[in-house]
Protein backbone atom coordinates (compact mmCIF):
# COMPACT_ATOMS: atom_id res chain seq x y z
CA UNK A 1 0.00 0.00 0.00
CA UNK A 2 0.84 3.46 -0.59
CA UNK A 3 1.97 6.89 0.14
CA UNK A 4 0.09 8.99 -2.40
CA UNK A 5 3.21 10.85 -3.46
CA UNK A 6 6.51 10.09 -5.16
CA UNK A 7 7.57 6.85 -3.54
CA UNK A 8 11.19 7.43 -4.53
CA UNK A 9 11.63 10.49 -2.36
CA UNK A 10 11.75 10.76 1.38
CA UNK A 11 9.30 13.29 2.77
CA UNK A 12 11.90 15.51 4.36
CA UNK A 13 15.07 15.50 2.34
CA UNK A 14 13.97 14.17 -1.03
CA UNK A 15 16.88 11.71 -0.99
CA UNK A 16 16.18 9.13 -3.70
CA UNK A 17 15.82 5.46 -2.89
CA UNK A 18 17.35 4.59 -6.26
CA UNK A 19 15.95 2.39 -8.98
CA UNK A 20 13.43 0.13 -7.25
CA UNK A 21 12.76 -3.21 -8.95
CA UNK A 22 9.36 -4.27 -10.27
CA UNK A 23 8.04 -7.76 -10.90
CA UNK A 24 8.33 -9.36 -14.28
CA UNK A 25 5.66 -12.08 -14.18
CA UNK A 26 6.44 -13.41 -17.67
CA UNK A 27 7.92 -16.59 -16.17
CA UNK A 28 4.36 -17.42 -15.11
CA UNK A 29 2.40 -15.95 -18.07
CA UNK A 30 2.94 -12.95 -20.30
CA UNK A 31 -0.59 -11.62 -19.77
CA UNK A 32 -4.28 -12.39 -19.19
CA UNK A 33 -4.63 -13.26 -22.87
CA UNK A 34 -1.46 -15.39 -23.13
CA UNK A 35 -2.12 -18.51 -25.23
CA UNK A 36 -0.22 -20.58 -22.64
CA UNK A 37 -2.73 -19.54 -19.99
CA UNK A 38 -5.66 -20.60 -22.18
CA UNK A 39 -3.86 -23.87 -22.94
CA UNK A 40 -3.30 -24.58 -19.22
CA UNK A 41 -6.92 -23.81 -18.32
CA UNK A 42 -8.14 -26.19 -21.05
CA UNK A 43 -5.67 -28.88 -19.94
CA UNK A 44 -6.69 -28.48 -16.30
CA UNK A 45 -10.38 -28.83 -17.12
CA UNK A 46 -9.82 -31.95 -19.21
CA UNK A 47 -7.28 -33.57 -16.87
CA UNK A 48 -9.38 -33.07 -13.72
CA UNK A 49 -12.33 -34.83 -15.39
CA UNK A 50 -10.09 -37.58 -16.77
CA UNK A 51 -8.49 -38.03 -13.34
CA UNK A 52 -11.84 -38.52 -11.66
CA UNK A 53 -12.91 -40.97 -14.36
CA UNK A 54 -9.68 -42.96 -13.96
CA UNK A 55 -9.50 -43.10 -10.17
CA UNK A 56 -12.76 -42.30 -8.36
CA UNK A 57 -13.88 -45.35 -6.41
CA UNK A 58 -10.75 -47.26 -7.48
CA UNK A 59 -7.91 -46.15 -5.15
CA UNK A 60 -8.23 -49.32 -3.06
CA UNK A 61 -7.62 -51.43 -6.20
CA UNK A 62 -4.31 -49.79 -7.18
CA UNK A 63 -0.91 -51.43 -6.84
CA UNK A 64 2.14 -49.40 -5.78
CA UNK A 65 3.02 -48.29 -9.32
CA UNK A 66 -0.59 -47.31 -10.00
CA UNK A 67 -0.79 -45.32 -6.75
CA UNK A 68 2.47 -43.53 -7.60
CA UNK A 69 1.08 -42.53 -10.99
CA UNK A 70 -2.15 -41.29 -9.33
CA UNK A 71 -0.15 -39.17 -6.86
CA UNK A 72 2.07 -37.71 -9.59
CA UNK A 73 -0.88 -36.82 -11.82
CA UNK A 74 -2.55 -35.16 -8.83
CA UNK A 75 0.64 -33.22 -8.13
CA UNK A 76 0.80 -32.01 -11.75
CA UNK A 77 -2.80 -30.75 -11.56
CA UNK A 78 -1.91 -28.84 -8.37
CA UNK A 79 1.11 -27.34 -10.07
CA UNK A 80 -0.80 -26.03 -13.10
CA UNK A 81 -3.63 -24.65 -10.92
CA UNK A 82 -1.03 -23.08 -8.62
CA UNK A 83 0.72 -21.42 -11.53
CA UNK A 84 -2.51 -19.81 -12.77
CA UNK A 85 -3.57 -18.60 -9.32
CA UNK A 86 -0.07 -17.29 -8.55
CA UNK A 87 -0.17 -15.18 -11.69
CA UNK A 88 -3.67 -13.86 -10.97
CA UNK A 89 -2.87 -13.21 -7.30
CA UNK A 90 0.46 -11.44 -7.81
CA UNK A 91 -1.04 -9.10 -10.42
CA UNK A 92 -3.92 -8.36 -8.04
CA UNK A 93 -1.63 -7.59 -5.08
CA UNK A 94 0.29 -5.11 -7.22
CA UNK A 95 -2.93 -3.12 -7.72
CA UNK A 96 -5.74 -4.29 -5.44
CA UNK A 97 -7.88 -1.30 -6.47
CA UNK A 98 -7.67 -2.18 -10.19
CA UNK A 99 -11.13 -3.51 -11.12
CA UNK A 100 -9.87 -5.53 -14.12
CA UNK A 101 -7.23 -7.31 -12.06
CA UNK A 102 -9.69 -8.00 -9.24
CA UNK A 103 -12.18 -9.43 -11.75
CA UNK A 104 -9.51 -11.56 -13.42
CA UNK A 105 -8.47 -13.05 -10.07
CA UNK A 106 -12.11 -13.76 -9.11
CA UNK A 107 -12.80 -15.33 -12.50
CA UNK A 108 -9.71 -17.56 -12.25
CA UNK A 109 -10.65 -18.53 -8.69
CA UNK A 110 -14.19 -19.45 -9.78
CA UNK A 111 -13.03 -21.41 -12.83
CA UNK A 112 -10.36 -23.34 -10.97
CA UNK A 113 -12.67 -24.10 -8.03
CA UNK A 114 -15.19 -25.53 -10.50
CA UNK A 115 -12.54 -27.46 -12.42
CA UNK A 116 -11.10 -28.95 -9.22
CA UNK A 117 -14.45 -30.14 -7.85
CA UNK A 118 -14.09 -33.60 -9.49
CA UNK A 119 -10.84 -34.05 -7.50
CA UNK A 120 -12.41 -33.59 -4.06
CA UNK A 121 -12.94 -37.36 -3.96
CA UNK A 122 -9.19 -38.06 -3.79
CA UNK A 123 -8.46 -36.91 -0.22
CA UNK A 124 -11.71 -38.39 1.06
CA UNK A 125 -11.19 -41.76 -0.58
CA UNK A 126 -7.48 -41.86 0.25
CA UNK A 127 -8.33 -41.36 3.92
CA UNK A 128 -10.66 -44.36 3.83
CA UNK A 129 -7.82 -46.68 2.79
CA UNK A 130 -6.60 -49.11 5.45
CA UNK A 131 -3.25 -48.41 7.12
CA UNK A 132 -1.97 -51.92 6.36
CA UNK A 133 -2.83 -51.56 2.67
CA UNK A 134 -0.85 -48.31 2.44
CA UNK A 135 2.08 -49.73 4.43
CA UNK A 136 2.33 -52.52 1.87
CA UNK A 137 2.36 -50.03 -1.03
CA UNK A 138 5.06 -47.89 0.61
CA UNK A 139 7.25 -50.96 1.19
CA UNK A 140 6.80 -52.05 -2.42
CA UNK A 141 7.82 -48.74 -4.02
CA UNK A 142 10.44 -46.30 -2.65
CA UNK A 143 9.35 -43.54 -5.08
CA UNK A 144 5.85 -43.74 -3.63
CA UNK A 145 7.20 -43.89 -0.05
CA UNK A 146 8.94 -40.53 -0.68
CA UNK A 147 5.48 -38.90 -0.74
CA UNK A 148 4.56 -40.38 2.62
CA UNK A 149 5.10 -37.21 4.77
CA UNK A 150 2.60 -35.25 2.62
CA UNK A 151 0.17 -38.17 2.52
CA UNK A 152 0.44 -38.62 6.30
CA UNK A 153 -0.45 -34.93 6.72
CA UNK A 154 -3.48 -35.52 4.50
CA UNK A 155 -4.48 -38.48 6.66
CA UNK A 156 -4.12 -36.36 9.82
CA UNK A 157 -7.54 -34.93 8.89
CA UNK A 158 -9.03 -38.42 8.58
CA UNK A 159 -10.87 -38.33 11.95
CA UNK A 160 -12.45 -34.98 11.01
CA UNK A 161 -13.57 -35.82 7.49
CA UNK A 162 -17.19 -35.32 6.42
CA UNK A 163 -19.18 -37.26 3.84
CA UNK A 164 -18.09 -36.95 0.20
CA UNK A 165 -21.21 -34.98 -0.60
CA UNK A 166 -20.66 -32.46 2.20
CA UNK A 167 -16.96 -32.06 1.36
CA UNK A 168 -17.86 -31.28 -2.25
CA UNK A 169 -20.48 -28.80 -1.08
CA UNK A 170 -17.94 -27.02 1.15
CA UNK A 171 -15.46 -26.95 -1.73
CA UNK A 172 -17.99 -25.42 -4.12
CA UNK A 173 -19.22 -22.79 -1.64
CA UNK A 174 -15.70 -21.71 -0.60
CA UNK A 175 -15.68 -18.91 -3.20
CA UNK A 176 -18.68 -17.23 -1.53
CA UNK A 177 -17.51 -18.07 1.99
CA UNK A 178 -14.18 -17.21 3.57
CA UNK A 179 -12.50 -16.11 0.34
CA UNK A 180 -15.29 -13.61 -0.40
CA UNK A 181 -14.99 -12.11 3.11
CA UNK A 182 -11.19 -12.03 2.71
CA UNK A 183 -11.65 -10.04 -0.48
CA UNK A 184 -14.07 -7.62 1.18
CA UNK A 185 -11.52 -7.06 3.94
CA UNK A 186 -8.64 -6.51 1.46
CA UNK A 187 -10.63 -4.09 -0.68
CA UNK A 188 -11.92 -2.18 2.36
CA UNK A 189 -8.40 -1.78 3.78
CA UNK A 190 -6.98 -0.80 0.37
CA UNK A 191 -9.71 1.79 -0.13
CA UNK A 192 -9.30 3.60 3.21
CA UNK A 193 -7.89 7.13 3.11
CA UNK A 194 -6.32 8.97 6.02
CA UNK A 195 -5.56 12.69 6.29
CA UNK A 196 -2.53 13.62 8.38
CA UNK A 197 -1.27 17.23 8.41
CA UNK A 198 -3.30 17.95 5.29
CA UNK A 199 -1.80 15.05 3.34
CA UNK A 200 -3.90 12.17 2.03
CA UNK A 201 -2.38 8.79 2.71
CA UNK A 202 -3.57 5.23 2.76
CA UNK A 203 -2.88 2.72 5.46
CA UNK A 204 0.75 1.82 4.73
CA UNK A 205 1.79 5.45 4.59
CA UNK A 206 -0.17 6.33 7.73
CA UNK A 207 1.19 3.40 9.77
CA UNK A 208 4.66 4.37 8.54
CA UNK A 209 4.21 7.73 10.32
CA UNK A 210 4.02 5.82 13.64
CA UNK A 211 7.80 5.44 13.30
CA UNK A 212 8.38 9.15 12.55
CA UNK A 213 10.91 11.01 14.75
CA UNK A 214 8.34 13.81 15.26
CA UNK A 215 6.12 12.81 18.21
CA UNK A 216 3.37 15.21 17.11
CA UNK A 217 3.21 13.47 13.71
CA UNK A 218 3.10 10.05 15.36
CA UNK A 219 0.24 11.11 17.58
CA UNK A 220 -1.66 12.66 14.66
CA UNK A 221 -1.24 9.43 12.64
CA UNK A 222 -2.35 7.22 15.55
CA UNK A 223 -5.44 9.34 16.19
CA UNK A 224 -6.31 9.39 12.48
CA UNK A 225 -5.98 5.59 12.28
CA UNK A 226 -8.28 5.32 15.31
CA UNK A 227 -10.80 7.73 13.73
CA UNK A 228 -10.92 5.94 10.35
CA UNK A 229 -11.08 2.49 11.93
CA UNK A 230 -13.82 3.76 14.25
CA UNK A 231 -15.88 4.89 11.25
CA UNK A 232 -15.46 1.47 9.60
CA UNK A 233 -15.49 -0.72 12.69
CA UNK A 234 -18.91 -2.26 11.96
CA UNK A 235 -17.64 -3.62 8.63
CA UNK A 236 -14.54 -5.12 10.28
CA UNK A 237 -16.63 -6.56 13.12
CA UNK A 238 -19.00 -8.13 10.57
CA UNK A 239 -16.05 -9.73 8.72
CA UNK A 240 -14.66 -11.19 11.97
CA UNK A 241 -18.06 -12.34 13.26
CA UNK A 242 -18.89 -14.09 9.99
CA UNK A 243 -15.50 -15.79 9.56
CA UNK A 244 -15.34 -16.91 13.20
CA UNK A 245 -18.90 -18.28 12.97
CA UNK A 246 -18.19 -20.04 9.68
CA UNK A 247 -15.12 -21.62 11.29
CA UNK A 248 -17.14 -22.66 14.34
CA UNK A 249 -19.77 -24.35 12.14
CA UNK A 250 -17.18 -26.18 10.03
CA UNK A 251 -15.15 -27.20 13.09
CA UNK A 252 -18.32 -28.46 14.82
CA UNK A 253 -19.34 -30.55 11.83
CA UNK A 254 -15.82 -31.93 11.59
CA UNK A 255 -15.74 -32.57 15.35
CA UNK A 256 -12.41 -30.76 15.71
CA UNK A 257 -11.46 -30.46 19.40
CA UNK A 258 -10.68 -26.72 19.36
CA UNK A 259 -10.69 -23.66 17.05
CA UNK A 260 -6.87 -23.94 16.88
CA UNK A 261 -6.80 -27.66 16.07
CA UNK A 262 -7.04 -27.26 12.28
CA UNK A 263 -4.04 -24.91 12.28
CA UNK A 264 -1.99 -27.24 14.49
CA UNK A 265 -2.77 -30.17 12.18
CA UNK A 266 -1.82 -28.23 9.03
CA UNK A 267 1.35 -27.01 10.80
CA UNK A 268 2.20 -30.60 11.71
CA UNK A 269 2.80 -29.50 15.29
CA UNK A 270 1.43 -30.88 18.52
CA UNK A 271 -0.93 -28.64 20.56
CA UNK A 272 1.23 -29.11 23.66
CA UNK A 273 4.29 -27.73 21.81
CA UNK A 274 2.35 -24.56 20.89
CA UNK A 275 1.04 -24.35 24.46
CA UNK A 276 4.61 -24.63 25.83
CA UNK A 277 5.70 -21.81 23.50
CA UNK A 278 2.72 -19.62 24.45
CA UNK A 279 3.21 -20.17 28.19
CA UNK A 280 6.98 -19.53 28.00
CA UNK A 281 6.43 -16.22 26.18
CA UNK A 282 3.60 -15.00 28.45
CA UNK A 283 5.70 -15.84 31.53
CA UNK A 284 8.57 -13.84 29.98
CA UNK A 285 6.52 -10.65 29.33
CA UNK A 286 7.92 -8.92 32.48
CA UNK A 287 11.51 -9.89 31.57
CA UNK A 288 11.15 -8.85 27.93
CA UNK A 289 8.59 -6.26 26.81
CA UNK A 290 7.87 -4.71 30.21
CA UNK A 291 11.58 -4.24 30.93
CA UNK A 292 12.47 -3.01 27.45
CA UNK A 293 9.65 -0.48 27.19
CA UNK A 294 10.57 0.94 30.63
CA UNK A 295 14.06 1.55 29.19
CA UNK A 296 12.58 3.10 26.07
CA UNK A 297 10.44 5.50 28.12
CA UNK A 298 13.62 6.64 29.89
CA UNK A 299 15.43 7.20 26.57
CA UNK A 300 12.49 9.23 25.27
CA UNK A 301 12.34 11.23 28.51
CA UNK A 302 8.78 10.11 29.26
CA UNK A 303 7.13 8.78 32.42
CA UNK A 304 4.51 6.95 30.36
CA UNK A 305 4.55 5.67 26.79
CA UNK A 306 1.57 6.21 24.50
CA UNK A 307 0.75 3.73 21.75
CA UNK A 308 2.30 6.09 19.20
CA UNK A 309 5.65 5.78 21.04
CA UNK A 310 5.87 1.98 20.75
CA UNK A 311 7.71 2.04 17.42
CA UNK A 312 9.20 5.53 17.78
CA UNK A 313 12.83 5.91 16.71
CA UNK A 314 15.24 6.47 19.58
CA UNK A 315 16.50 10.04 20.17
CA UNK A 316 20.05 8.98 19.25
CA UNK A 317 18.92 7.22 16.07
CA UNK A 318 20.07 8.50 12.70
CA UNK A 319 17.07 9.44 10.58
CA UNK A 320 18.61 8.59 7.26
CA UNK A 321 17.13 6.89 4.25
CA UNK A 322 18.83 3.69 3.08
CA UNK A 323 18.95 3.56 -0.73
CA UNK A 324 18.03 0.34 -2.52
CA UNK A 325 21.60 -0.42 -3.67
CA UNK A 326 22.92 -0.11 -0.13
CA UNK A 327 20.12 -2.33 1.21
CA UNK A 328 20.89 -4.95 -1.43
CA UNK A 329 24.64 -4.89 -0.66
CA UNK A 330 24.07 -5.09 3.12
CA UNK A 331 21.85 -8.17 2.84
CA UNK A 332 23.87 -9.91 0.13
CA UNK A 333 27.16 -9.39 2.01
CA UNK A 334 25.60 -10.84 5.16
CA UNK A 335 24.29 -13.86 3.23
CA UNK A 336 27.65 -14.39 1.49
CA UNK A 337 29.44 -14.07 4.86
CA UNK A 338 27.45 -17.06 6.11
CA UNK A 339 27.91 -19.06 2.90
CA UNK A 340 28.53 -17.91 -0.71
CA UNK A 341 25.88 -20.39 -1.89
CA UNK A 342 23.22 -18.44 0.00
CA UNK A 343 24.11 -15.24 -1.86
CA UNK A 344 24.18 -17.08 -5.21
CA UNK A 345 20.64 -18.36 -4.65
CA UNK A 346 19.49 -14.83 -3.72
CA UNK A 347 21.14 -13.05 -6.69
CA UNK A 348 18.48 -13.76 -9.37
CA UNK A 349 15.80 -12.11 -7.20
CA UNK A 350 17.53 -8.78 -7.88
CA UNK A 351 18.63 -9.47 -11.43
CA UNK A 352 15.57 -11.13 -12.97
CA UNK A 353 12.54 -9.14 -11.79
CA UNK A 354 11.57 -11.40 -8.90
CA UNK A 355 11.14 -8.45 -6.46
CA UNK A 356 8.50 -5.71 -6.48
CA UNK A 357 9.76 -3.06 -4.06
CA UNK A 358 8.17 0.32 -4.80
CA UNK A 359 5.28 1.76 -2.79
CA UNK A 360 2.48 2.34 -5.33
CA UNK A 361 -1.20 3.39 -5.18
CA UNK A 362 -3.45 0.38 -4.61
CA UNK A 363 -0.57 -2.00 -3.86
CA UNK A 364 -1.23 -4.46 -1.04
CA UNK A 365 0.36 -3.46 2.27
CA UNK A 366 3.25 -5.24 3.98
CA UNK A 367 5.63 -7.73 2.45
CA UNK A 368 5.66 -11.40 1.47
CA UNK A 369 7.51 -14.06 -0.48
CA UNK A 370 5.23 -16.19 -2.65
CA UNK A 371 6.69 -19.55 -3.73
CA UNK A 372 4.41 -19.81 -6.84
CA UNK A 373 5.13 -23.37 -8.09
CA UNK A 374 8.25 -25.52 -8.00
CA UNK A 375 8.71 -25.38 -11.80
CA UNK A 376 9.00 -21.56 -11.73
CA UNK A 377 10.47 -19.57 -8.78
CA UNK A 378 9.34 -17.39 -5.88
CA UNK A 379 8.47 -13.70 -6.07
CA UNK A 380 9.06 -11.19 -3.25
CA UNK A 381 6.82 -8.19 -2.55
CA UNK A 382 8.01 -5.25 -0.43
CA UNK A 383 6.82 -1.71 0.26
CA UNK A 384 10.31 -0.23 0.44
CA UNK A 385 10.54 3.21 2.05
CA UNK A 386 14.27 3.19 2.88
CA UNK A 387 14.02 2.75 6.65
CA UNK A 388 16.64 0.57 8.36
CA UNK A 389 13.80 -1.84 9.24
CA UNK A 390 12.97 -2.10 5.53
CA UNK A 391 16.49 -3.54 5.08
CA UNK A 392 15.58 -6.18 7.67
CA UNK A 393 12.31 -6.86 5.81
CA UNK A 394 14.32 -7.42 2.62
CA UNK A 395 16.61 -9.84 4.50
CA UNK A 396 13.52 -11.61 5.91
CA UNK A 397 11.60 -12.04 2.65
CA UNK A 398 14.75 -12.98 0.74
CA UNK A 399 15.32 -15.70 3.37
CA UNK A 400 11.88 -17.07 2.51
CA UNK A 401 12.81 -16.90 -1.18
CA UNK A 402 16.07 -18.84 -0.66
CA UNK A 403 14.16 -21.46 1.38
CA UNK A 404 11.53 -21.81 -1.34
CA UNK A 405 14.17 -22.17 -4.07
CA UNK A 406 16.00 -24.88 -2.09
CA UNK A 407 12.81 -26.76 -1.16
CA UNK A 408 11.52 -26.73 -4.76
CA UNK A 409 13.58 -29.87 -5.45
CA UNK A 410 11.06 -31.80 -3.33
CA UNK A 411 8.33 -31.19 -5.91
CA UNK A 412 4.91 -29.60 -5.51
CA UNK A 413 3.55 -31.88 -2.83
CA UNK A 414 6.55 -31.97 -0.48
CA UNK A 415 8.14 -28.54 -0.96
CA UNK A 416 5.65 -26.59 1.15
CA UNK A 417 6.93 -26.15 4.70
CA UNK A 418 4.53 -26.11 7.66
CA UNK A 419 4.09 -22.54 8.95
CA UNK A 420 6.00 -23.31 12.15
CA UNK A 421 9.14 -23.98 10.10
CA UNK A 422 8.33 -21.61 7.22
CA UNK A 423 9.76 -18.65 9.16
CA UNK A 424 13.10 -20.38 9.85
CA UNK A 425 15.12 -19.15 6.87
CA UNK A 426 13.53 -15.70 6.88
CA UNK A 427 14.29 -14.99 10.55
CA UNK A 428 17.75 -16.56 10.16
CA UNK A 429 18.41 -14.26 7.18
CA UNK A 430 17.41 -11.30 9.36
CA UNK A 431 19.70 -12.47 12.16
CA UNK A 432 22.67 -12.82 9.78
CA UNK A 433 22.04 -9.29 8.45
CA UNK A 434 21.65 -7.87 11.96
CA UNK A 435 24.86 -9.51 13.23
CA UNK A 436 26.80 -8.25 10.20
CA UNK A 437 25.46 -4.72 10.72
CA UNK A 438 26.20 -4.89 14.48
CA UNK A 439 29.78 -5.98 13.81
CA UNK A 440 30.14 -2.97 11.51
CA UNK A 441 28.79 -0.45 14.07
CA UNK A 442 31.15 2.52 14.33
CA UNK A 443 30.61 3.27 18.05
CA UNK A 444 28.60 2.35 21.16
CA UNK A 445 25.81 4.80 20.32
CA UNK A 446 25.20 3.13 16.96
CA UNK A 447 25.50 -0.30 18.58
CA UNK A 448 22.90 0.70 21.17
CA UNK A 449 20.46 1.84 18.48
CA UNK A 450 20.93 -1.39 16.54
CA UNK A 451 20.49 -3.58 19.61
CA UNK A 452 17.36 -1.66 20.60
CA UNK A 453 15.97 -1.97 17.07
CA UNK A 454 16.59 -5.73 17.11
CA UNK A 455 14.96 -6.12 20.52
CA UNK A 456 11.91 -4.19 19.25
CA UNK A 457 11.70 -6.42 16.18
CA UNK A 458 11.95 -9.52 18.36
CA UNK A 459 9.29 -8.21 20.75
CA UNK A 460 7.06 -7.50 17.74
CA UNK A 461 7.73 -11.03 16.44
CA UNK A 462 7.46 -12.96 19.70
CA UNK A 463 5.58 -11.00 22.39
CA UNK A 464 3.20 -9.20 20.07
CA UNK A 465 2.37 -12.28 17.99
CA UNK A 466 1.64 -14.38 21.07
CA UNK A 467 -0.59 -11.55 22.33
CA UNK A 468 -2.30 -11.68 18.91
CA UNK A 469 -2.67 -15.46 19.31
CA UNK A 470 -4.28 -15.00 22.74
CA UNK A 471 -6.63 -12.38 21.24
CA UNK A 472 -7.69 -14.85 18.52
CA UNK A 473 -8.20 -17.62 21.06
CA UNK A 474 -10.45 -15.31 23.10
CA UNK A 475 -12.27 -14.03 19.99
CA UNK A 476 -13.13 -17.51 18.70
CA UNK A 477 -14.13 -18.75 22.17
CA UNK A 478 -16.40 -15.70 22.68
CA UNK A 479 -17.95 -16.05 19.20
CA UNK A 480 -19.03 -19.57 20.09
CA UNK A 481 -21.24 -17.99 22.77
CA UNK A 482 -22.92 -15.59 20.31
CA UNK A 483 -22.58 -12.54 18.06
CA UNK A 484 -19.86 -10.07 19.11
CA UNK A 485 -20.44 -6.33 18.99
CA UNK A 486 -17.53 -4.07 17.99
CA UNK A 487 -17.28 -3.15 21.71
CA UNK A 488 -16.95 -6.84 22.63
CA UNK A 489 -14.07 -7.32 20.17
CA UNK A 490 -12.46 -4.07 21.34
CA UNK A 491 -12.52 -5.31 24.94
CA UNK A 492 -10.86 -8.61 24.00
CA UNK A 493 -8.13 -6.71 22.15
CA UNK A 494 -7.42 -4.41 25.10
CA UNK A 495 -7.29 -7.36 27.52
CA UNK A 496 -4.15 -8.72 25.81
CA UNK A 497 -2.52 -5.36 25.03
CA UNK A 498 -2.01 -4.16 28.61
CA UNK A 499 -0.75 -7.57 29.71
CA UNK A 500 1.81 -7.89 26.90
CA UNK A 501 3.06 -4.29 26.65
CA UNK A 502 3.32 -3.63 30.37
CA UNK A 503 2.57 -0.95 32.97
CA UNK A 504 4.57 1.84 31.30
CA UNK A 505 1.92 2.18 28.56
CA UNK A 506 -1.17 4.36 28.47
CA UNK A 507 -3.76 3.62 25.80
CA UNK A 508 -5.46 6.43 23.88
CA UNK A 509 -9.15 6.34 23.10
CA UNK A 510 -9.55 4.55 19.78
CA UNK A 511 -6.63 2.14 20.23
CA UNK A 512 -9.21 -0.52 21.06
CA UNK A 513 -10.01 -0.64 17.30
CA UNK A 514 -6.46 -1.48 16.18
CA UNK A 515 -7.28 -5.18 15.78
CA UNK A 516 -9.18 -4.22 12.64
CA UNK A 517 -6.33 -4.04 10.13
CA UNK A 518 -4.33 -7.20 10.97
CA UNK A 519 -4.77 -9.44 7.92
CA UNK A 520 -3.72 -12.72 9.54
CA UNK A 521 -6.83 -12.76 11.73
CA UNK A 522 -8.91 -12.71 8.53
CA UNK A 523 -6.83 -14.69 6.03
CA UNK A 524 -5.19 -17.32 8.26
CA UNK A 525 -6.71 -17.85 11.71
CA UNK A 526 -4.06 -18.71 14.34
CA UNK A 527 -1.22 -18.19 11.84
CA UNK A 528 0.46 -15.69 14.15
CA UNK A 529 2.07 -18.12 16.60
CA UNK A 530 4.22 -19.37 13.70
CA UNK A 531 6.19 -16.10 13.87
CA UNK A 532 7.01 -16.62 17.54
CA UNK A 533 7.75 -20.30 16.86
CA UNK A 534 10.10 -19.29 14.02
CA UNK A 535 11.88 -16.62 16.05
CA UNK A 536 12.38 -18.90 19.05
CA UNK A 537 13.57 -21.71 16.81
CA UNK A 538 16.03 -19.46 14.97
CA UNK A 539 17.40 -18.00 18.20
CA UNK A 540 18.10 -21.54 19.40
CA UNK A 541 19.56 -22.43 15.97
CA UNK A 542 21.78 -19.35 15.94
CA UNK A 543 23.04 -20.20 19.43
CA UNK A 544 23.91 -23.67 18.08
CA UNK A 545 25.73 -22.01 15.14
CA UNK A 546 27.80 -19.85 17.53
CA UNK A 547 28.58 -22.82 19.77
CA UNK A 548 29.62 -25.15 16.92
CA UNK A 549 30.04 -23.34 13.58
CA UNK A 550 31.96 -26.22 11.97
CA UNK A 551 29.70 -27.98 9.43
CA UNK A 552 26.67 -25.93 10.44
CA UNK A 553 26.05 -24.57 6.93
CA UNK A 554 25.67 -28.04 5.41
CA UNK A 555 23.16 -29.08 8.07
CA UNK A 556 21.30 -25.78 7.62
CA UNK A 557 20.97 -26.15 3.84
CA UNK A 558 19.88 -29.78 4.28
CA UNK A 559 17.12 -28.56 6.60
CA UNK A 560 15.92 -25.98 4.03
CA UNK A 561 16.09 -28.46 1.15
CA UNK A 562 13.87 -30.84 3.13
CA UNK A 563 10.89 -28.47 2.68
CA UNK A 564 7.86 -30.22 4.13
CA UNK A 565 9.30 -33.72 3.85
CA UNK A 566 10.28 -34.01 7.54
CA UNK A 567 8.73 -33.32 10.96
CA UNK A 568 10.25 -30.55 13.13
CA UNK A 569 11.73 -33.18 15.50
CA UNK A 570 13.60 -34.82 12.63
CA UNK A 571 14.78 -31.50 11.16
CA UNK A 572 16.13 -30.16 14.45
CA UNK A 573 17.75 -33.39 15.68
CA UNK A 574 21.06 -32.84 13.75
CA UNK A 575 21.48 -29.58 15.70
CA UNK A 576 20.75 -31.25 19.06
CA UNK A 577 17.50 -29.28 19.45
CA UNK A 578 13.96 -30.39 20.36
CA UNK A 579 10.98 -28.00 20.20
CA UNK A 580 8.86 -30.29 22.39
CA UNK A 581 11.22 -29.58 25.32
CA UNK A 582 9.88 -26.51 27.24
CA UNK A 583 13.51 -25.49 27.96
CA UNK A 584 13.98 -25.08 24.18
CA UNK A 585 11.76 -21.97 24.20
CA UNK A 586 13.53 -20.49 27.22
CA UNK A 587 16.79 -20.76 25.28
CA UNK A 588 15.34 -18.69 22.43
CA UNK A 589 13.80 -16.13 24.79
CA UNK A 590 17.13 -15.97 26.61
CA UNK A 591 18.73 -14.44 23.53
CA UNK A 592 16.26 -11.51 23.61
CA UNK A 593 16.81 -11.17 27.36
CA UNK A 594 20.58 -11.11 26.77
CA UNK A 595 20.21 -8.21 24.33
CA UNK A 596 18.15 -6.27 26.92
CA UNK A 597 20.85 -7.02 29.53
CA UNK A 598 23.41 -5.44 27.18
CA UNK A 599 21.21 -2.36 26.73
CA UNK A 600 20.77 -1.99 30.49
CA UNK A 601 24.53 -2.35 30.99
CA UNK A 602 25.10 0.50 28.49
CA UNK A 603 22.95 2.70 30.74
CA UNK A 604 25.48 2.21 33.53
Image (cartoon, rainbow, N blue to C red):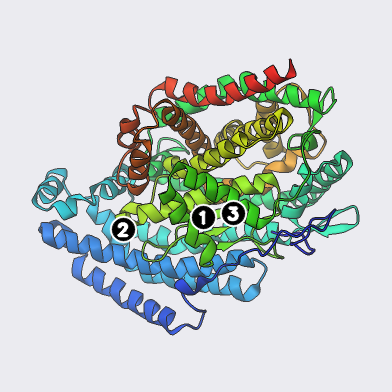
- At 91% from the left and 56% from the top, the residue drawn is 198
Q: Note whether residue 43 is visible.
A: yes
Q: Residue furthest right?
A: 198
Describe residue 489's horizontal placement relative to residue 397 as left or right: right
Q: Which residue is mark 2?
A: 411
Do the residues under discs 3 and 2 have CB atoms within 8 angstroms?
no
Q: Residue drawn at (43%, 62%), measured in percent from left and top?
A: 377
Chain-order first, disc 3 or disc 2? 3
In this rendering, the answer to whether 310 lies above or below 120 is above
Horizontal side, residue 339 vs residue 524: left or right: left
Residue beneath disc 1: 369
**Mark pair 3, 1: CA separation:** 16 Å
| Gap in angstroms between the C-alphas marked 1 and 2 | 18 Å
Q: Position of residue 153 (x, y in %)?
A: 31, 46
Q: Position of residue 521 (x, y in %)?
A: 58, 45
How far across and how far down the image is residue 419, in percent?
A: 44, 44
Which of disc 1 and disc 3 is earlier in sequence?
A: 3
Amino acid sequence: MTLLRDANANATGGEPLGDLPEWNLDDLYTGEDAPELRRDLDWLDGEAKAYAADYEGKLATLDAAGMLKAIQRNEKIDEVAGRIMSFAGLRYYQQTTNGDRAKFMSDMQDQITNMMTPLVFFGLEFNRLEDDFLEGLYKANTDLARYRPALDRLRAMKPYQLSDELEKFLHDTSVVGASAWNKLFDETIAGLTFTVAGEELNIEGTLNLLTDPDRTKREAAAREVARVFGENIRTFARVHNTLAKEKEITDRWRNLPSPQAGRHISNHVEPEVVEALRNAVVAAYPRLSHRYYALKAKWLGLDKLQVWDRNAPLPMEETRIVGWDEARKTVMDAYAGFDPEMAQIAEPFFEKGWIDAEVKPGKAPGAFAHPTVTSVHPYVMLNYLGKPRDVMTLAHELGHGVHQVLAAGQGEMLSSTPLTLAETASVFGEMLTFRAMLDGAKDDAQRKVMLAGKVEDMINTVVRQIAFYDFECKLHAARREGELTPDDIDALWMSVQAESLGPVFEFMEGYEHFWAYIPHFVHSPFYVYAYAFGDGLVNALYAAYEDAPEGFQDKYFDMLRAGGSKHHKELLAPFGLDASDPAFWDKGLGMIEGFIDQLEAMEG
